[in-house]
Image: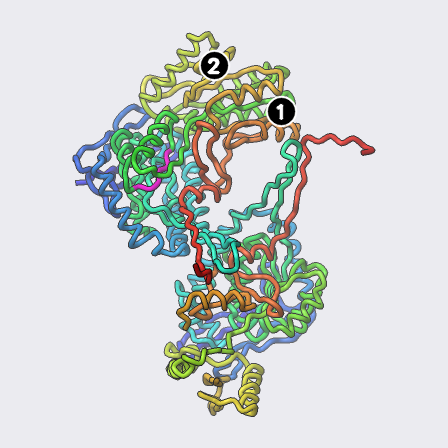
Amino acid sequence: MAHTATVNIEKLNKSIQVPTGLFINNEFVPSVDSQERIDAINPATEEVICSVTAGSAKDIDVAVAAARAAFTNTWGKNVTGWERSRLLHKLADLMERDAQVLGELESLNNGKPVRIARQVGVDFDIGDSIQCLRYYAGWADKLAGQTLEVDNRTKLAFTRHDPIGVCGQIIPWNYPINMWAWKVAPALAVGCTIVMKPSELTPLTALKLSELVKEAGFPPGVVNTVPSLGSVGGAALASHMDVDKVAFTGSTVTGRKIMEAAAKSNLKKDCTAGSRVYAQDTVYDKFLELLVSKVKAQVIGNGLDEETGAGPVVSKGQYDRVWGYIESGKADGAHLLLGGAKRNDKGYFIDPTNNNSMADDANQCMRVSSALEAGTVWVNQYNLLYNNVPFGGKKQSGIGRELGSYALEEYTSVKAVHWNFGEKLEWPL
Amino acid sequence: MPTSFTHDFDTPVYKGRTSFETGLFINGKFVDGSEGETIDIVNPATGKVITSVSEGTAKDVDIAVAAAQEAYEKSWGLTVSGRERSNILWKFAELMEAHAKELGAIEALNNGKTFGWASSVDVVFSIDVTKYYAGWADKVTGQVLETNDKTLSYTRHEPIGVVGQIIPWNFPPLATGNTVVLKPSEFTPLSALRVCALLNEAGVPPGVVNVVTGYGNTVGEAITSHSKIEKVAFTGSTLVGRKVMEAAAKSNLKKVTLELGGKSPNIIFNDADMEQAVKWTAHGLFWNHGQACCAGSRIFVQSGVYDEFLQKFTAKAKEIKLGDPFGEGVDQGPQISQIQYDRIMGYINSGLTDGAKIHLGGGRVGTDGYFIEPTIFVDANPEMRIVQEEIFGPVGVIIKFDNEEDVIRQANDTFYGLAAAVFSKDINRAINTANKLKAGTVWVNCYNTFHPTVPFGGFKQSGIGRELGEYCLHNYTNVKAVQVNLGTKL
C-alpha cells in the first residue's frame, strides 16, 4: 500500500508528492495498531491538504526499537565523525536541491509566506536550516575530550564525549523546517539516533524531509518520524524507558508535563516571541508613529502569493486563542492603535494588532542587557538568530541551549577514563 | 604569454589528459614572471624535462603581496563571514575531489611517488584536510573574561592578514580569514598550479590566494623578509628553517611557524607483536621513498628479538618493488631530484667509510631516473653521520639495545624532536615510554598515521608550532583583547 498523497498547489499550478506513512527504519509504514489519521490543514483556506497516519504509543515503541538498534549497530560509536559530517552535508545538499518544494509545502501547511520559507542563502527558514545542517556537519569530526592531569608519572585520565543514545524530539508548528534542523543536526553530528514527533498541525515537511534523510544515505533507524498527537506520541516518548533524552520545543505548560513524565530525561522548552515593547518616555511618541507605519506596510495574505509578507496563524485553535487575548485587552481598557477587527473571508488571518503606553548609549545597553534575566538579549535589533550563537531560556522558559557549540553538549554524555599505567597497589593499604 | 602544460597520460594505472596554465597565479590570473624567465620541471623517474613554469622574482612577490593585501581588506578578512568562507572552502574541496585522479597523476609525474599513493592517499588527505578546516571557518571563538562588574572584557580571534606559505597547506589560513602568498617547491610546483583554476571556480575571490613559483634564495627570501607579510609558515630542512627565522627577525618580526626535519626513533621491545612491528616499521621508514620529515629512520630493537626482527624486516624490504610511478604493482618510485640523489648516496658512502655495515641495498637502480634501493645499515654507532643526520631517503639504521632507560636516553639524544614510535604489547610500558620521548608525535604500535583532527609538529629543532587539528588555527589568528569601561570614572 502506497503511503503518499498528491498535494495540489492551485496557485502555482503544480502538485507535490508527500509521504503520509510513519517513517521508521527508512520506510514509510502504516500504524501497527491504529486506523487514526491526522488532517493537515491549510490555514489560509481552512481546507484539508491531506491526511497522514497518526502514530500510536505502540508505534512509538517500534520507532524507539529501530532507533536503539541503529544506535547499537550502525550509528553511535560505529560511525566516525568524518562519516557523520559527510552525510549531514549530503542532506544539506538535498535540502538545497528541493528548497522550492519544501518551501511551498511549508507555506501550505503553516501559512508563512513562501518567499520567507524558501529563500536559500538568506537568513530565512530553509536557507537558515541548510546552513544549520552544514554548521553541525562541521562539528561532527571536532568533538574532543580532554586529557586531565592526575599524576603525570603514573596516571592517564581523559574524557570521551560519547553520544547520549536514542533521543526523542518533539517540535512545534511555528517553524516546522527550522525547528527540525535545529534538533536533528546536533543530535546526528554527535552520533545520537532520533525519534522525531513533528507537530500534529504541521507534519508534512518533516515527512518530506524524511525522504531526503534516506536519500542522503543515513542508515535505517537513525532518523524516525512519527506524526502523532502530543498527548499520545509526545507523552509516549517522554515516558519511554528506552529513550535516553527528550528535546522539546513548545509551551511551558506542556514542557512541565514532559519533565514530569520524563523523570531522568533532559528537555527543552519554548521560546517566546517578544510581545511586550517598552519604549522610554522621551521617544515614545516617535517610536509609536514609526512602528505603526511599518506594521501597516506589511501585506497579510495567502502564503503562496509572492507579495505576502505575513500569513495566517496556523490553526483554528491558535486563532481563537489570540482573539481571546485581543478581546481581553479591549475589555481591560487598553487602547488599540491598530487592527482588532476580524476579517470576513476564509483563513485564520489576524491583522497586526498593537496595544499601547533605540539606545545609543552603549553603557546603558550593557547595563540593561546584563540585568535582564533572559537567555538571549537583543540590543538594537530583534529576532535575529545565527546558527553559531546559542539560544535557550532562563527560568521557566527552558532548560538547555540550542545552536552553537552549546547544543552539542545536550546530546553528549561525558565518560571519564582513568588509566593506571604505573602505580602498583599494595593491599591492604 | 604565460606558460602552460598539456599532457596525455597513457599508463597501466591511469589514462587521461591534463591541461593547465603554469604562469604565476596572482589576483586570480596566470601571468608571466616579471623577468620573463622560466624554470624547467623534471620527471624524476626519467631525469627528463617535462615542461617549464614561470619563474617569479622579488618583484613578483611585491605584486602578489599587494594583491593579497587588497583582497584582505576588501573581499576576505573581516569583510566575509566564517559561514561564507566555510561554503567556499567546502566547494573547493569538492572540486579537488572531482579531479582527484588527475591531481594524483600530476603529482606522480612531477614528484615520483606512485600514482596509487598520490591519488588515494596524498590527494584524498588534502581533500579531507580542506573539508576539516572548512568546518572550522565559522567556529573560531573568542572568550568573555571575568574582570569586574564595571568592565566588559572579551577577546576577538582575528585573522592576521597576509601570510606567506612556503609549505603545501593552504586551508587553515584561509579558514580563519587570512590571504596567502604561496611559494611551492621549485621542483614540484605542478599540482599547486593545477588547483589554482579550481580556486577561481570555487569562488575564492581574486587575490586571496597567490602562487609565486621560484627559487628559495629569490622568492623564498623575498617572502621571509617582506615588510607587509605578517606571518610565514615554512616546511623544509632545519638549515633553511633557521634562515627563514633570521630573515623574519631582521625584517618585521613576522610570526614564524616551522615544520622541519627529524631523525625519529622507532623503539621495538621484546614483547612487540613482531609481524606488525615489521610492517609498521617498513611503512615508517620507506613511505614516500624515505622523503618524510617524520620517517622512523633510527630503529632500536631490543636484543631478545633483534635477530628475528632483522631477518624479517630485511625480507619485508626486499618485497618492495621499485619502478615507474605509473607501473602496475610498483611500491617505490624515484627520489625527487639529482641533488637529493647525490645527498643520499653521500650518506650511504659516509656510513661505509665510518665503519657501519650495509645489510641490504645501498645502490642505484637502473640508469635513468633517481632510483635508490631500500637500504638497511647495521653495526652503526651513535656518533656516525648516518645516525645523527637526516638522510631523507630510503635508508634506515638498526641499533640493538638492552635496557629501557638507556634506549630512551639514546632516542632522545638528538637535536631533532619530530616523531617517535614504540612497539610493545605491554600498554603500560608503551604509554610510559611515550611520555618520556621528546617528540611532537608518538605513535604506539603504529607509524605514519595522520588525521586532520590530530596536531603535528616538532619539539626542539624540528620546528615551531603545530599543524592540523584545532591547534593549527592558533598559527593564523591574532588575539585582540577588548576592554570596555562601563562606568569607572577617573
Q: Helix or strand or loop: what does disc 1 sit on?
A: loop
Which portion, as a residue range, is magenta? B229-234
From the image, which quarter does the C terminus of chain B lie in?
A: bottom left
The answer for which chain carries disc 2 is B
Residue name at image x 67 percent, y 65 percent:
A237
The answer for which chain carries disc 1 is B
Across and down, in percent, residue A194 comes to: 60, 59
B337 is higher (above) or lower (below) than A1:
above
A382 is higher (above) or lower (below) than B25:
below
Residues marked 2 and 1, same chain: yes
Q: Kindly identify which residue carries mark 1.
A: B272
Which of labels 2 and 1 is toward the front? Answer: 1
Quadrant housing residue B422: top right
Report, in whole angstroms, how far the alpha carbon at label 2 lies from the one at label 1.
23 Å
Disc count in the image?
2
The image's mark for residue B360 is 2
Quadrant housing residue B325: top left
Residue B258 seen = yes
The image's mark for residue B392 is none
Q: Is residue B230 magenta?
A: yes
Quadrant housing residue B394: top left
Q: Does the magenta stretch include residue B211?
A: no
**Mark 1: amino acid:** Ala
Across and down, in percent, residue A95 comes to: 46, 62
**Mark 2: amino acid:** Leu
Across and down, in percent, residue B209 comes to: 31, 45
Q: Which class describes the residues within 10 Å of circle 1: few (<14), some (14-19), or many (20+)?
A: many
Q: Which class describes the residues within 10 Å of circle 2: few (<14), some (14-19), or many (20+)?
A: some
Residue A256 left/right relative to B86: right
A411 is higher (above) or lower (below) than A292:
above
| First in residue order: circle 2 vs circle 1 | 1
Q: Is the magenta stretch mostly helix, strand or loop?
A: strand
